[in-house]
Amino acid sequence: MTVQILSSPKNPNLQLARSLLEQNKARRKHNAFVAEGVRVLEDGLASTVPLRFILYKTSLSPRAKTLLESIKPGQSVFEVEDRLFDSLSDTQSSQGILGVFSIPEPSPPPSPGFVVILDQLRDPGNLGTILRSAEAAGVQAICLPPGNTDVWAPKVVRSAMGAHFRLPLLQWHWEAITAYVEGLSVYHADMDGQETLWQADFRGRIALLIGGESEGISPEGRLLATRSVRIPMLGKTESLNAAISASVLMFEVLRQRSQKG
């Protein structure tokens, strides 16, 4: 592995990484995103998503050093002075390593049986957590109509813990999403849902529609939903946040399907 040392903030690779970390428009323009941290980077390197380059700081953790040793010949790797790397990262305890990847072209299954539609999710941490749970629960594709926070933003990528490399993320308009989920029962998660998650039959081909905490689902989402489902609660809490609600529902789908037959 050949390593170049970067010491100037004007280096094009450093400038690109900074813009990808800070700007949605830069991620769209360059069709690229940043995966920061050893665990996420390990998932990226194990995937088929194209790696553009890796940046790492001079002082590294043992796990990060082990990761560097696994880098294939020919991949672009740059050592960055600590002060410069720290100026890039917005995490409190950076692991000192990040990778810049191309945003992959999604390959969704042509006839899905379990899809999640996220509608007006504004919080990056919640969005990333939902992706992480979705991948663990066996969701086949995530539909992201306009109105969600940027799914490739750094905080979303960190919170998703590698799900970006394993899940088809479909940033489509409502018309395309409607066509894709045709034939599926679309369950809208609602505090006042028609049936509880234990009464609902999730064993068929379904989509879960999860709305944002502040605005709920959009008019387009309401038109698409065919049923509503609620999570019973005994305490005085009025509602669960979107990530917890989505996770509870997704794993109920998994539970029901694991007992099918």
Image (cartoon, rainbow, N blue to C red):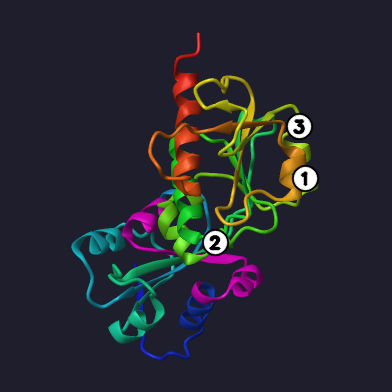
Nearest to the eye among marks 2 and 3: give it.
3
Left or right for 67, reference 234: left
Q: Which amino acid, mark 1? A: Ala
What secondary structure predominates along the stretch shown in magenta?
Answer: helix
Residue drawn at point x = 57 percent, y = 66 percent: 32
Q: Is residue 140 visible?
A: yes
Task: Give the numbered dot on residue 176.
Answer: 1
Q: Position of residue 25 (x, y in %)?
A: 64, 73
Residue 139 shown left or right of residue 95 in the figure = right
Q: Residue at x 47, y 54 (%)?
A: 126
For label 2, the crowd category at 10 Å Cα-Cα, with few meaning under 14, some 14 to 19 and many 20 or more, is many
Which sits earlier in the primary sequence, circle 1 or circle 2?
Answer: 2
Which of marks 3 and 2 precedes in the sequence? 2
> Could you tell me residue 227's position as x and y percent?
67, 30
Judge left or right: residue 249 versus residue 220: left
Residue 116: x and y, percent? 59, 40
Looking at the picture, tell me which residue is in the foreground, 202 or 176.
202
Q: Tell me the SS state at disc 3.
A: loop
**Sequence-first disc among 3 and 1:** 1
Taking the magenta stretch, the answer to whether it contains residue 22 is: yes
Q: Secondary structure at mark 1?
A: helix
- Pointer 3: what residue? 182
Q: Which residue matches tag 2?
A: 152
Number of numbered callouts drawn: 3
- Where residue 30 appears, as percent x and y from the top left, is 62, 71
Q: CA distance from mark 3 to mark 1?
A: 10 Å
Is 144 placed above or below 252 here?
Answer: below
- State the mark number for residue 3: none
* Residue span colored magenta: 21-45
